[in-house]
Amino acid sequence: MIFKEDSLYIVDLLKLCIEKKGFNESIRTEINKFYETNYEDEDPQISEEIASVYMAFLGKTDFKNLDSDASKKHLKLLLSELEHIEEKINAL
């Protein structure tokens, strides 16, 4: 498995989840599989950054009030963070 390809895939999944304001079990399984894989070429910093966005999405998103200004701002920030992570991955 190649870390760069898989990490870009996970970033795309997370973007989709944020844009759709939710996720399902198959997406959770894909993300967990990414973290259970031992990559020879893994960049631990990028893995941690992806995990940070994932955890912020799960833990800090107000799923009961997704249309509030605070929720919209939070989700926009997460998408921005994913864009920066994607740039780092593409530079590998």
Image (cartoon, rainbow, N blue to C red):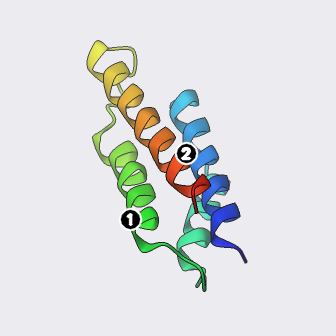
Mark nearer the viewer, 1 or 2: 1
Q: Residues within 10 Å of mark 2 (few under 14, many from 20)?
A: many
Spatial separation of the CA atoms under disc 1 and disc 2: 14 Å
**Mark 1 belongs to which amino acid?**
Glu
Q: Which of the pair 36/12 is nearer the observer?
A: 12
Residue 25 on image: x %, y %: 61, 54
**Mark 2 belongs to which amino acid?**
Leu
Tell me which label, 1 or 2, sits earlier in the chain: 2
Residue hosting label 1 = 48
Residue hosting label 2 = 14
On the rendered structure, is 52 left or right of 23? left
Residue 15 on image: x %, y %: 56, 38
Residue 88 on image: x %, y %: 50, 53
Q: Residue at the location (39% across, 43% down)?
A: 57
Q: Residue at the location (32% across, 14% down)?
A: 68
Q: Going by the picture, which residue comes out furthest to the front?
A: 91
The quarter of the rendered structure image containing the C terminus is bottom right
Asked if one can make out residue 13 in the rendered structure from this viewpoint, the answer is yes
Residue 62 on image: x %, y %: 32, 31
Using the rendered view, name the quadrant where residue 66 is placed. Answer: top left
Secondary structure category for the residue under label 1: helix
Is 52 drawn above or below residue 82 in the view shown? below
Is 61 drawn above or below residue 24 in the view shown? above
The quarter of the rendered structure image containing the N terminus is bottom right
Q: How crowded is mark 1: few (under 14 residues within 10 Å), some or many (20 or more)?
A: few
Q: Residue at the location (49% across, 72% down)?
A: 43
On the rendered structure, is 71 left or right of 10? left
Q: Residue at the location (46% across, 66% down)?
A: 47
